[in-house]
Image: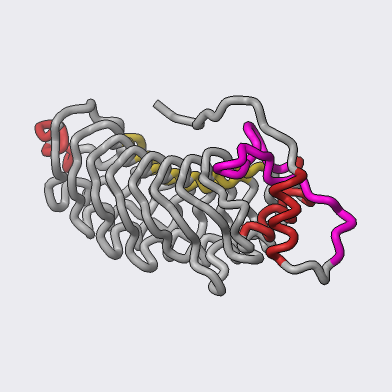
Amino acid sequence: MMCILKCLTKLTQLTNLYPPRNESQSLPEGVFDKLTRLTHLDLESNKLQSILSGVFDKLTQLIQLELDGNQLKFLPIGIFDKLTKLIHLEVERNQLQSLSTGVFDKLTQLKELHMYNNQLQSLPMFDKLTQLKELHLYNNQLQSLPSGVGVFDKLTSLTELGLCCNKFQSLPHGVFDKLTSLTSIYLYTNPWDCTCPGVDYLSRWLHTNSKKETSTSAKCAKQRMVLHFIFPQVSDFWSASSISSLILTTLALLTSPDFCLLHS
């Protein structure tokens, strides 16, 4: 691929670039600077371990960028800042453990963000991605979401959210309340702790939004019980611990096997 990339300076009218897969671990500085008309760039399934922060700066017309299937451990601050027309971004199947604050802030037109099959342990705020419709975060190492900051609050256009196959035991109160356009959510294969009072919000939300939960239901990690069933007549004055106890003793057993939604 390196030989092909070095010839790109002559292809100034190019709009779509799908270079062949190879063993490249990095991209030369300025390699895309002459491709100012590029709208689609596919760098999937190479061996990229790092990317210079300004390598995409001249690609101001780009609407789709695929970086999936590489070996990226981090995304430099400002890496996407010039891609203000980007609609589709794929960084799944890498080795990302964390994301810089504000790394997606300039992507105000983004509609799809794929970050599954990484090693993410934390998330940035998504408050600038108001046009986002799909957010795929499954198969990471996420254990919790920040409480009190509304990590998803600005995603009012979001229709699909994938959080399955992580390490969540509970979620902050109100975390899904602003997702007014949501139609599909994936929560299965997380070790939900139904003895924890913090799981009460999720149980109530799932009961109200049961049609949005797709595939296998979320369930308690140890008791193998469906999480979203709760008696609607439970009074508001009941304590969270009492409700959690009620969930443990009344939920129906889930007999279908777990499965993870994996993309090859």
Left or right of residue 259: residue 97: left
- Residue 108 horizontal/vertical position (percent): 50, 61
Asked whether residue 200 is drawn in magenta, I would say no
Residue 89 seen by the camera: yes
> In the image, what residue occupies the spot 23% across and 41% down?
71
Asked whether residue 220 is drawn in magenta, I would say yes
| Quadrant including the N terminus | top left
Q: Which residues are magenta?
A: 212-235
> In the image, what residue occupies the spot 59% across and 59% down?
196
**Colour scheme employed for the rendering of this structure:** secondary structure
- Residue 61 horizontal/vertical position (percent): 39, 50
Residue 88 seen by the camera: no
Q: Residue furthest right?
A: 233
- Residue 159 horizontal/vertical position (percent): 64, 47
Residue sitting nearer the eye, 187 or 159: 187
> In the image, what residue occupies the spot 33% across and 64% down?
100
Compared to residue 46, the image places residue 170 above or below, namely below
- Residue 205 horizontal/vertical position (percent): 72, 55
Q: Quadrant of residue 252?
A: top right
Q: Quadrant of residue 101?
A: bottom left
Residue sitting nearer the eye, 42 or 39: 42
> In the image, what residue occupies the spot 40% across and 59% down?
122
Q: Main secondary structure of the magenta part?
A: loop
Residue sitting nearer the eye, 183 or 233: 233
The number of discs equals: 0
Left or right of residue 48: residue 198: right
Left or right of residue 250: residue 262: left
